[in-house]
Image: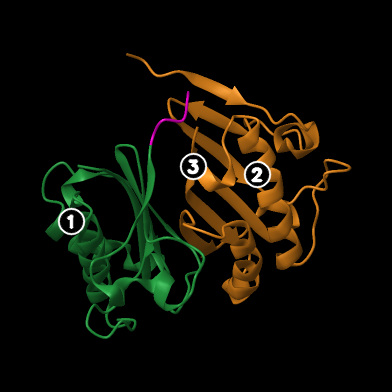
Chain colours: A green, B orange
Amino acid sequence: MTGQLSRTVIEPNNPRLNVSRNANLPHSPGIRAGEYIFLSGIGPVDPVTGGRNLGPIADQIRQTLQNMEHMLTFAGSGLDRIVKINIVLADIQDYDEMNRVWREFFSVDPPARTTCTLQLSNGNGVEMECIALSL
Amino acid sequence: MALQRDVIAPKASAVDMSRGLNLPLSPAIRAGEFIFVSGMVAIDPATGKRMCGTVAAETRQIPAAMTQVLESAGSSLAKTVKVNVLIYSMLEYNNMNEVYREFFPADPPARTVCGAKLSGGSKVEIECVALA
């Protein structure tokens, strides 16, 4: 009730994945608030070129989850510390394929999850955001 | 120990969508150290009715009203940790961003933006989680 929790910006270790900085967008990649980490929506950004990986949807999903893992690990968290994840697909026809790739990353005790289809930016086929435990 | 759950009602009732639009939701809920603010559309502060304008005009109105909701709970835009923005067309992404950034000059919150069909002709809807 008294506002004692700290609020700090989290950024990826790889500067090419820092989309908000590179494209001058008004958001932080992530915010740590007390024992929680809130990540912005992440897309399939190529960690080598900084461009978009707009290949097959399986590749995009794998790349997005790897980027999320990079963000969380560098912040002292990890994919296994995610409590809730939201997945937005550009095309709900990709739902089964998304689940197939998803299982590669979350074999036990997967996080709570919501998936839906919405319009995405930059031609992304997928975007994901999450809330994770900090440590 | 069980965390407390309190309904947050803005002091200026015109920005209270649940009242102005007679909707079955609370403007915000405080849960422990966090405040969860409902999706807010642009509301005319004089009438409490929905304000339909350009994406820029609607975007300008919403953080102003959100400030009132957060401040009535002792929080502020600077304490927001996560924002979700829904806009009716991603073609308006830059128009939204140019207004949005004025409200978050430093260390902006994490954010996701998507294009979606919104209620009542609104072009922009914004929700957030903030520290209390």
Q: Quadrant of residue A70?
A: bottom left
Q: What chain letter is assigned to the residue under label 2?
A: B
- From the viewer's side, name the closer residue of A122 and A93: A122
- Tell me the magenta residue range: A1-5
In this rendering, does residue A54 appear at all? yes
Query: Callout 1: residue from which chain?
Result: A
Image x and y of residue A6, in percent: 38, 39
Report helix, strand or loop for mark 2: helix
Q: Which residue is under mark 2? A: B66
| Residue linked to disc 1 | A73
Work out how far the residue at label 3 is from the one at label 2, CA to CA, in angstroms: 11 Å
Estimate the spatial distance between the alpha carbons at disc 2 and disc 1, rounded to whole Å.
Answer: 32 Å
Q: Based on the picture, tell me whether residue A19 belongs to the magenta stretch.
A: no
Task: Please name whichever residue, B30 or A124, is drawn nearer the observer in this view of the structure.
Answer: B30
Q: What amino acid is labelled 3 in the image?
A: Val
Secondary element under disc 3, as helix, strand or loop, is: strand
The x and y percentages for residue A55 are 28, 83
Q: Tell me the tag on residue B129.
A: 3
- Amino acid type assigned to the residue bearing label 2 in the image: Met
Q: Mark 3, chain letter?
A: B
Q: In this rendering, is residue B82 above or below B52?
A: above
The verdict on residue A3 being magenta is: yes
Amino acid marked by disc 1? Thr
Say yes or no: labels 3 and 1 on the same chain.
Answer: no
